[in-house]
């Protein structure tokens, strides 16, 4: 398991990065791309969700993790720091470069050690993206998305993923989505308890909805 010190290091690292880039992106530390809007996930909230889901056996740490629309790579880094081999797909060239740079730095800092943490450029609904990764979509045991084309991704999971594949949808919306072919397991209503000031750049409360392929 990642230590609290590692989580704090991750939060601090991404706070520094996000503040440096506030003026670079026209929308602050968010970015409109050709497939949606990048909004940074709260590391603290997703860490809470991961710990619960690993402890309860919902997430299998031995199965590859996919962040579909990985932005700056923070959730890939978090999953890897927890010992889960993690891949990220991002369509925006600038964000891909940023995510790769961040993972190099986090490896140098020792936050990411033995588990894979790999970023690829591509559209998570396009089969060619997985060919370029030397993977099949069905290889992934857990798939994460921050409410970006969530319905399209859910449909792909229902059609192509293996049974019991877990779909984690992070949302600020209280309305629960229903997806054909996926079973809704439960909703984690979480509040960030971070002492890091990066909370000012993130949504401090969110819903992590847990679905599974039938």
Image: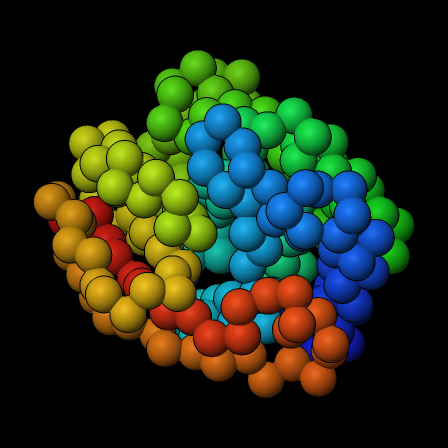
Q: Nearer the viewer, residue 159 or 45?
A: 45
Q: Nearer the viewer, residue 167 or 64?
A: 167
Q: Is residue 183 above or below residue 43?
A: above
Residue 99 image-quadrant placement: top right
- Going 38% across and 50% down the picture, which residue do you hit? 147
- Going 20% across and 57% down the picture, which residue do you hit? 177
Which residue lies most toward the right here? Answer: 108
Q: Is residue 55 visible?
A: no
Q: Nearer the viewer, residue 134 or 151?
A: 151
What colouring method underlies this structural image?
A: rainbow
Q: Is residue 76 above or below residue 174?
A: above
Q: Nearer the viewer, residue 3 or 47?
A: 47
Residue 159 image-quadrant placement: top left
Q: Is residue 137 visible?
A: yes
Residue 92 drawn at (x, y percent):
59, 29
Residue 190 drawn at (x, y percent):
43, 78
Q: Is residue 118 left or right of residue 16?
A: left
Residue 73 drawn at (x, y percent):
64, 46
Residue 173 drawn at (x, y percent):
32, 64
- Going 34% across and 33% down the picture, which residue do you hit? 138
Q: How many marks?
A: 0
Q: Is residue 84 above or below residue 124?
A: below
Q: Is residue 199 above or below residue 131?
A: below
- Going 35% across and 74% down the picture, which residue do you hit? 188
Image quadrant holding the N terminus, namely bottom right
Q: Is residue 10 left or right of residue 117?
A: right
């Amino acid at each position: 398991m990642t230590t609290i010190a590692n989580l704090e290091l991750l939060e601090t690292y991404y706070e520094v990065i996000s503040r440096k880039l506030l003026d670079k992106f026209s929308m602050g530390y968010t970015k409109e791309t050709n497939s949606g809007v990048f909004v940074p996930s709260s590391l603290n909230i997703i860490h809470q969700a991961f710990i619960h889901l690993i402890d309860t056996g919902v997430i299998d740490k031995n199965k590859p993790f996919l962040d579909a629309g990985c932005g700056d790579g923070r959730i890939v880094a978090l999953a890897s720091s927890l010992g889960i081999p993690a891949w990220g797909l991002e369509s925006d060239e600038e964000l891909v470069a940023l995510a790769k740079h961040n993972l190099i730095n986090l490896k140098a800092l020792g936050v990411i050690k033995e588990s894979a943490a790999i970023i690829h450029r591509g559209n998570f609904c396009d089969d060619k993206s997985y060919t370029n990764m030397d993977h099949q979509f069905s290889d992934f045991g857990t798939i994460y998305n921050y409410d970006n084309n969530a319905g399209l991704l859910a449909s792909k999971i229902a059609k192509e993923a293996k049974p019991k594949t877990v779909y984690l949808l992070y949302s600020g919306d209280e309305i629960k989505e229903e997806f054909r072919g996926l079973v809704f397991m439960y909703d984690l209503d979480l509040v960030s308890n971070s002492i890091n000031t990066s909370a000012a750049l993130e949504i401090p409360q969110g819903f992590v909805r847990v679905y599974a392929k039938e």
